[in-house]
Image (spheres, helix red, strand yellow):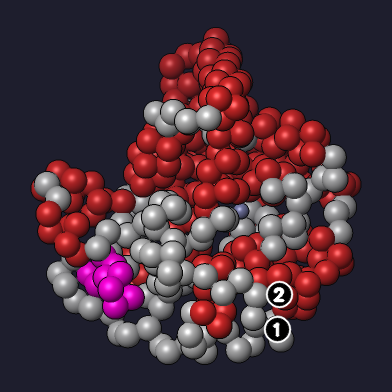
């Protein structure tokens, strides 16, 4: 089976764009953000300001998820429209759109779970961990914890991957400069406006807290997208193939209805990996049409519970790429991955 065969199952119906729906959802996210930020600046109590700031962080995450679909070209036939609106929707999360888009679309979606290329949430192997300095190990342990996972996104994705990243090609360097100048201008303007309206605390509550809440939320979500005791990562191109990477390497997670509504079905990740042209509002129906086609594959679908999250963070700490198994920091090994129906990798090469 090839990825193209599965994409053919989705067909034009799964890609059908609804501009009005996209605009309506964007307007909803902007409205939520505006209300929450206003509260974060003007509420009379500093603690209430922080609560509004946390709410704004959820709205920032929703805007980012919307922009993610725009960056895939899933929302508008007009590429320029998607680029302009996606750039604007990513401003409050301080993500430079074009730079982020390059990493996400080419690196992550090009080689999902192949860690020599797709480096986000790449687990260390036990040997690397044993050889690391105590400080590096501490940082890694913080990243791989349910409470500290935001550190991974902040340090490795945002700081190393976007602030400090220097692309090799001229066009990418130009894109980087362009995106960062817009994002920096927004940051300065937003912080100045909050300061004039409410002082230093308003800057913290309306700009910094929403960004930190977004950072944590997106780290947590993207961790669960590809990490689970029964999912694996690949260290070599010869053992990786697109079907394993995108279909069996991604997860479908059922979450409460308000979360689905707020975050544009971001937890239905497998159909998105299978075909990035499916807009977020068609992921659910697209998955229904795909189910029979992937029935023979080792697809992971579960309901989000605190117990499941606890088990995943406890078991998925180090990954032994040689035998494809997770182990904890205390060398407790996970059960062997259930034998999938994939058989020989060669037979499944996309
Ligand atoms: Zn994507």
Query: Which element is circle 2 on?
Result: helix
Judge whether 266 appears above or below 77 on screen.
Answer: below
- Identify the residue under disc 2: 6
Can you tell which mark lies on residue 293?
A: 1
Magenta residues span 318-328
Query: Which element is circle 1 on?
Result: loop
Q: Describe residue 160's horizontal placement relative to residue 84 as left or right.
A: left
Q: Please say whether residue 291 is visible from this viewpoint.
A: yes
**Closest to the observer, 239 or 339:** 239
Instruction: Bin the neighbour count of mark 2 within 10 Å (Cα to Cα): few under 14, some 14-19, many 20 and up.
Output: some
Can you tell which mark lies on residue 247?
A: none
**Closest to the observer, 36 or 247:** 247
Residue 298: image x %, image y %?
Answer: 53, 83
Rendered residue at 52%/49% (across/down): 107
Quadrant where the N terminus sits is: bottom right
Q: Please say whether residue 300 is visible from this viewpoint.
A: no
Q: Give whichever of discs 1 and 2 has the lower sequence position.
A: 2
**Closest to the observer, 287 or 337:** 337
Residue 79: image x %, image y %?
Answer: 79, 39
């Amino acid at each position: 089976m090839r990825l193209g065969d599965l994409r053919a199952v989705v067909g034009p119906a799964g890609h059908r764009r609804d501009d009005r729906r996209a605009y309506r959802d964007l307007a909803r996210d902007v409205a939520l953000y505006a209300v929450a930020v206003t509260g974060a600046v003007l509420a009379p109590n500093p603690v209430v300001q922080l609560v509004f700031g946390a709410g704004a962080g959820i709205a920032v995450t929703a805007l980012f998820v919307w922009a993610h679909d725009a960056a895939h070209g899933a929302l508008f036939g007009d590429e320029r429209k998607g680029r302009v609106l996606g750039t604007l929707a990513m401003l409050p999360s301080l993500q430079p759109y074009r730079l982020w888009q390059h990493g996400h679309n080419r690196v992550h979606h090009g080689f999902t779970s192949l860690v020599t290329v797709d480096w986000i949430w790449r687990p260390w192997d036990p040997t690397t961990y044993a050889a690391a300095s105590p400080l590096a190990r501490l940082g890694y342990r913080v990243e791989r914890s349910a409470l500290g996972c935001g550190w991974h996104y902040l340090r490795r994705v945002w700081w190393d991957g976007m602030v400090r990243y220097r692309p090799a090609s001229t066009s990418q360097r130009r894109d980087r400069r362009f995106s960062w100048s817009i994002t920096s201008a927004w940051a300065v303007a937003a912080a100045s406006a909050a300061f004039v309206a409410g002082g230093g605390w308003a800057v913290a509550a309306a700009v910094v807290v929403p960004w930190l809440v977004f950072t944590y939320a997106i780290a947590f979500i993207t961790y669960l997208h590809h990490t689970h005791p029964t999912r694996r990562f690949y260290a070599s191109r010869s053992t990786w193939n697109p079907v394993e990477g995108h279909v069996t390497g991604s997860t479908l997670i059922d979450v409460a209805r308000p979360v689905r509504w707020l975050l544009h079905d971001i937890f239905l990740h497998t159909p998105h990996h299978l075909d990035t042209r499916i807009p977020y509002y068609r992921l659910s129906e697209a998955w229904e049409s795909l189910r029979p086609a992937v029935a023979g594959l080792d697809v992971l679908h579960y309901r989000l519970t605190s117990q499941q999250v606890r088990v995943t963070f406890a078991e998925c700490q180090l990954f032994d790429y040689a035998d494809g198994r997770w182990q904890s920091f205390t060398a407790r090994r996970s059960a062997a991955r259930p034998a999938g129906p994939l058989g020989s990798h060669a037979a499944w090469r996309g």
